């Protein structure tokens, strides 16, 4: 069974997100570790929070990479997980649209449009059948 082209695009987007999260997590963990080595008193505690944040980002990056790989392998659970995560992102964009003004509204509209297209695409019968057949 050939992969639908949109699924490949979504998987690549997941991998790009994973790369960004892994890069930022590494920078945070290493940077705040170095900062903690030279900091004194309460500032060293804040450095510890930065290291923990970096480790959390590394974990999220690993999960995103795994979901992207599973989408690429046409695993049904990855399709459902993607729909759920994108729906959460859509809800957050709706909240952002009504909470902020100016450029944030334009960004929220853009995000809502992309999320709606992804959910619509993954719900299409030929796409969902491709996941069930593999």
Image (tube, helix red, strand yellow):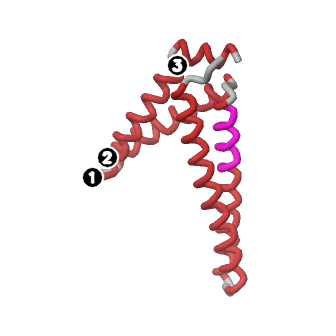
- Going by the image, does 119 lie left or right of 67? left
Between 91 and 13, the one nearer to me in the picture: 13
- Examine the rendered structure and indicate whether residue 17 appears above or below residue 70: below
Would you name the residue on which mark 1 appears?
A: 102
The quadrant where residue 77 appears:
top right
Q: Which residue lies at the image location 54% right of the left edge and 35% below the top edge?
A: 10
The quadrant where residue 50 appears:
bottom right
- Examine the rendered structure and indicate whether residue 24 appears above or below residue 89: below
- Examine the rendered structure and indicate whether residue 35 appears above or below residue 122: below
Q: Which of marks 2 and 3 is nearer the N terminus?
A: 2
Q: Is disc 1 surrounded by few (<14), some (14 to 19) or many (20+) residues within 10 Å?
A: few
Mark 3 residue element:
helix
Would you name the residue on which mark 3 appears?
A: 123
Q: Which residue lies at the image location 52% right of the left edge and 36% below the top edge?
A: 88
Between 71 and 102, the one nearer to me in the picture: 71
Mark 2 residue element:
helix
**Do the residues under discs 2 and 3 have CB atoms within 8 angstroms?**
no
Between 66 and 112, the one nearer to me in the picture: 66
Mark 1 residue element:
loop
Q: Which residue lies at the image location 62% right of the left edge and 17% below the top edge?
A: 130
Majority secondary structure of magenta residues: helix
Residue 66 screen position, x and y as percent? 70, 40
Q: Is disc 3 surrounded by few (<14), some (14 to 19) or many (20+) residues within 10 Å?
A: some
Q: Is residue 62 magenta?
A: yes
Q: Specify the quadrant that holds the N terminus.
A: top right
Residue segment shown in magenta: 60-71
Label 3 to label 1: alpha-carbon separation: 32 Å
Would you name the residue on which mark 2 appears?
A: 105
- Going by the image, does 70 lie left or right of 4? right
Label 2 to label 1: alpha-carbon separation: 6 Å
Q: Which residue lies at the image location 69% right of the left edge and 32% below the top edge?
A: 70
**Do the residues under discs 2 and 1 have CB atoms within 8 angstroms?**
yes
């Amino acid at each position: 069974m050939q992969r639908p082209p949109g699924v490949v695009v979504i998987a690549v987007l997941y991998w790009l997100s994973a790369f960004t999260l892994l890069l930022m997590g590494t920078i945070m963990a290493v940077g705040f570790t170095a900062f903690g080595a030279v900091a004194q008193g309460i500032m060293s505690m804040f450095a510890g929070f930065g290291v923990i944040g970096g480790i959390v980002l590394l974990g999220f990056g690993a999960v995103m990479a795994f979901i992207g790989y599973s989408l690429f392998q046409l695993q049904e659970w990855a399709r459902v997980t993607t729909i759920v995560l994108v729906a959460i992102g859509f809800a957050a964009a709706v909240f952002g649209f009504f909470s902020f003004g100016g450029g944030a509204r334009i960004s929220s509209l853009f995000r809502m449009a992309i999320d709606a297209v992804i959910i619509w695409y993954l719900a299409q019968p030929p796409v969902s059948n491709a996941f069930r057949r593999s």
